[in-house]
Image (tube, grey):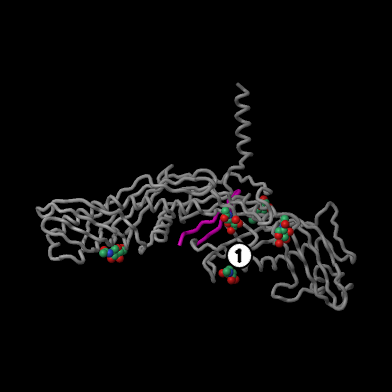
Amino acid sequence: MLWVYNITFLLLTLSTICHGDNPGAKLHITERGLKKGVEYLVNNMMSNNAVYELSDVTGSEDIASEDMSYEFTKIRMVQFHHGIISAQWMPETGLHVLMENGNATINCNWKLDSWLIKDSGSSVMTLMGLSISMIMGVRRIEPGVPSIYLLDCQSSVQHVDVKMLGGVSYFFESIKEPIQNVVQRSVNQQLCSSIRNQVKKWDQSFSQLNMTVSLNRFIELDLSLVGYPEISDHYANLGLKGLFYAQNKSHSETAFSPAPMTFPVKDSTMVYIGLSQSSVDSLCSAYFSAGFLTFQVSHMVGSKELTTSALAAYMPEISEHFPNPAPVKIKLSATRSPLVFLLLNNMTVQFRGFIQTNAYPPNTKSQNIFSAYIVASLQGSFSFSEAKAAQGLNLTGSFHLDRFQVEGSKPVINTAKGVAKEKGVQQLVQDVVMPVVNEELARGVFIPSGVLKNAFVSIEKGFAILAADLK
Ligand SMILES: *[C@@H]1O[C@H](CO)[C@@H](O)[C@H](O)[C@H]1NC(C)=O
Ligand SMILES: *[C@@H]1O[C@H](CO)[C@@H](O)[C@H](O)[C@H]1NC(C)=O
Ligand SMILES: *[C@@H]1O[C@H](CO)[C@@H](O)[C@H](O)[C@H]1NC(C)=O
Ligand SMILES: *[C@@H]1O[C@H](CO)[C@@H](O)[C@H](O)[C@H]1NC(C)=O
Ligand SMILES: *[C@@H]1O[C@H](CO)[C@@H](O)[C@H](O)[C@H]1NC(C)=O
């Protein structure tokens, strides 16, 4: 029997190691998020002023002791107010949406034919107390896009008011009620089929969604759905690929195997977006591949020009080589993609790079003061605010230097002048380079997302969470 345990152990171990199919990002939508999302969908995709065509209604009815045949054609719902919307998740299925106490206006042409009258004209009908209850399934279809479908639909109209225009209108008061009943019945039947068409249209537009979004000219983010949506009573989790990549680097070159993310149970905001450490790493890698991780420093904080005399605080011998202050430029560039480590309330970045410092004395060519390979450990913190100019979020952050080392077993600081020592370089990076990097980060990175507000970042073990409300 021992082999059974061994195999089980092996499989369990493998399943924790080989998690290539885990989502890199996860979207957690709470009940409040669902309600807001449904309102958004209904308000934006089911415009109050859109015209919905319903099919013709024909038949005959015993009206005022007359057998009267009727025909309502060109029925168009010209106005639709959905009333009060409520929505709930349905475990393992999708969602239940209820619209109550809505109203609608319908225009149509009518024709009545009986022994007593033969007449035609147009009419305006007002539907009141409109209620629609629908259950929609949510699933994932290839290539990783969401799909919705109508599982059940019930509708009811409490009251219909018909105004006949044209024709011999004095006659209508006596036949108004039976006509209203006919309209009420048939509208009721038709509402759900019109909704079925609407849901098909929504699904169609979902299926055409491009799940790859551009962050900027160089970096793209793959957000295709990974795995089936996980739906419980109070929330839905959608697994997303969450892979960032540089446009000029092929997709498949990036090794990507996120660890599973388990969200802490919190329901105070509408949506939670989890970003795994792998996903954050892919973002760093994309920035690195796109050539963004190079920083040029030519001024101190407060825009004072960086000169050899300012450097004297870090490497005193420099004054001997440059008796007259000369402008200095420090260039720091990553030599490989930075590695990010996420722990509870703790984000550490390991940065490997090359630092090069040159002086630019007037009337001579530039001189290298020192160059060195460095390894630095940085502690980062980030926060979101509403962007000022455009619709979106403003991501600002700061780093502070935790550990710093000139790389190699014996520190090699390539300098002809012999002025730079590891301690001095570290202090220089700490006092001059970091503030410039932080100045850049404090200016903020604009994230175009018109739908999120009250965004808040927190760091958990292995992933970061963005909590936000929908506008
Ligand atoms: C229809 O509903 C809208 C929004 O609730 C309301 O403003 C409007 O007065 C209603 N129309 C009728 C005829 O009841
Ligand atoms: C999706 O959008 C991305 C980024 O804008 C673009 O590079 C890609 O070609 C698009 N894919 C399709 C199938 O349109
Ligand atoms: C991608 O483009 C950036 C910026 O143009 C460049 O610095 C980088 O070397 C390019 N990377 C590759 C792999 O071509
Ligand atoms: C964060 O984690 C790193 C690496 O484990 C550790 O060195 C550092 O002290 C931690 N920082 C804080 C503020 O907890
Ligand atoms: C982002 O926030 C910073 C700091 O408050 C501010 O200086 C910057 O202008 C903001 N950027 C945008 C796009 O709102």
Seen from the viewer's position, the closer of residues 296 and 229 is 229
Dominant SS of magenta comes to strand
Q: How many labels does the image show?
A: 1
Seen from the viewer's position, the closer of residues 433 and 65 is 65
Q: Quadrant of the C terminus?
A: bottom left
Query: Three-letter amino acid code at disc 1?
Result: Val
- The reply to whether the magenta stretch includes residue 429 is no
Residue density around tag 1, few if under 14, some if 14–19, many if 20 or more, within 10 Å: some
Ligand 2 picture quarter: bottom right
- The reply to whether the magenta stretch includes residue 459 is yes
| x and y, in percent, of residue 342 in the image | 63, 51
Q: Is residue 212 visible?
A: no
Residue occupying image coordinates x 71% and y 75%: 303
In the displayed structure, 63 sits above or below 434; it is: above
- What range of the chain is rendered magenta? 454-471
| x and y, in percent, of residue 58 in the image | 23, 52
Residue occupying image coordinates x 63% and y 27%: 6
Name the residue at the top extreme: 1
Q: Is residue 457 visible?
A: yes
| x and y, in percent, of residue 435 in the image | 69, 67
Residue occupying image coordinates x 69% and y 62%: 292
Is 169 displayed left or right of 268 in the figure?
left
Per the image, the residue denoted by label 1 is 445
Seen from the viewer's position, the closer of residues 411 and 44 is 44
| SS category of the residue bearing label 1 | strand
Asked which quadrant contains residue 356, the reply is bottom right
| x and y, in percent, of residue 313 in the image | 80, 70
Q: Quadrant of the N terminus?
A: top right
Is 110 displayed left or right of 147 in the figure?
left
